[in-house]
Amino acid sequence: MSTSAVRILIIFFCLFIVMDLNSITEITLGNGAILTGQDEVSPVNLTYNSIRCQMIITKEELNSEGIYGPVALTEFGFNIYEAPVQALPNYKIRMADVTVDDAENHNTATLKTVFTSTAYSPIAGAFDTLQLTDSYIWQGYDNILVDVTFGFAGSTETAGRVYGSAIQNGFRYVGSTDFSQTYSTTTTVMNYRPDIKLGFQPYSANGWPALSQDSPFGSSNRYVGSASIYRNEDMGSYGTITHLGWNVMNSNNRSIPAKIYLKEVTTDYFNS
């Protein structure tokens, strides 16, 4: 196809992760031998108004459950025995690939936020499995750092108990009754780790060679991607894009996560 360097164009990268529930492989890590106390810190405990905690999932643990990278981690949950009465504000789960195999020291790795909720209300009685708001791609080489935090709650409670397992230096935290700990350094180490449920889906990092740029999520039979170029004369003389939308003819009423990327280019058409 022809190309032109006359105009500044905008390209929309859209990649939809199709959530086929039949493709999810779920595993649990831990034996439930430990039940945290009412005033003992856990990822859902309100002994402090705000906490930040860290724990490590090792490559060996995942491999022993038949999980090998690269895969997309799409579900995550703790085994909740007792939920706090009030919702946990600005709840975040963040992750990073790391080489350390325990939480003996605070980890400063660059974190990717995979789950956020302005008010998370844990559900007691089983694993409260959360659909991650942004999938985590585990390449299969390193361990996974899990960093959980919530903002400043209105009051404290002796509630928020989870099942866990005895692991040396398995969990560390920092808590405060004065201010949010979202970015604070964790200071206290405990010899347990909350039991965890994980859900994985297939992933392939094939990319989009026609665009000379890798797809953010790769491509496989679980992923659908598209790209479009819009010329500036098509869009009119507007300086700021504030809304995007499509004329949807029909829908299967399923909720799917999507990402949209914008980039200025100088071509009229895709090179192929």
Image (cartoon, helix red, strand yellow):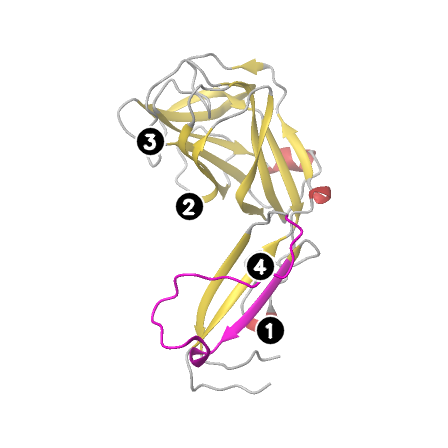
* Amino acid type, callout 1: Ala
The spot of residue 22 in percent (x, y) is 73, 42
Depth check, front residue: 119 or 143 = 119
| Secondary element type, mark 3 | loop
| Local SS, label 2 | loop
Which of the numbered marks, if any, corresponds to residue 110? 2
Residue at (33, 29) in percent of width and height: 152
What residue would you read off at disc 4?
A: 15
Task: Kindly identify the amino acid type of the residue bearing the numbered disc 3.
Answer: Gln
Is residue 233 placed above or below 21 in the rendered structure? below
Q: Is residue 242 left or right of residue 129?
A: left
Residue furthest to the front:
249
User: Given the image, on which type of amino acid does mark 4 rest?
Assistant: Leu
Residue at the right extreme, as displayed? 22
Separation (CA) of disc 2 from disc 1: 31 Å
**Local SS, label 4:** strand
User: Is residue 238 inside the magenta stretch?
Assistant: yes
Identify which amino acid the numbered label 2 is placed on.
Thr
Label 3 – label 2 distance at C-alpha? 17 Å
Q: Is residue 245 above or below residue 179?
A: below
Q: Distance from label 4 to label 1 (Cα)? A: 15 Å
Range of the magenta residues? 224-253
Q: Residue at x 66, y 45 (%)?
A: 201
Give the residue at mark 3: 181
Q: Residues within 10 Å of mark 4 (few under 14, many from 20)?
A: many
Asked whether, in this view, residue 111 is left or right of residue 20, the answer is left
Question: Which residue is pictured at 62% across the width and 79% down the height?
Answer: 272
- Nearer the observer, disc 2 or disc 4? 4
Rendered location of residue 43, percent (x, y): 46, 26
Kindly identify which residue carries mark 1. Answer: 210
In primary-sequence order, the first of circles 4 and 3 is 4
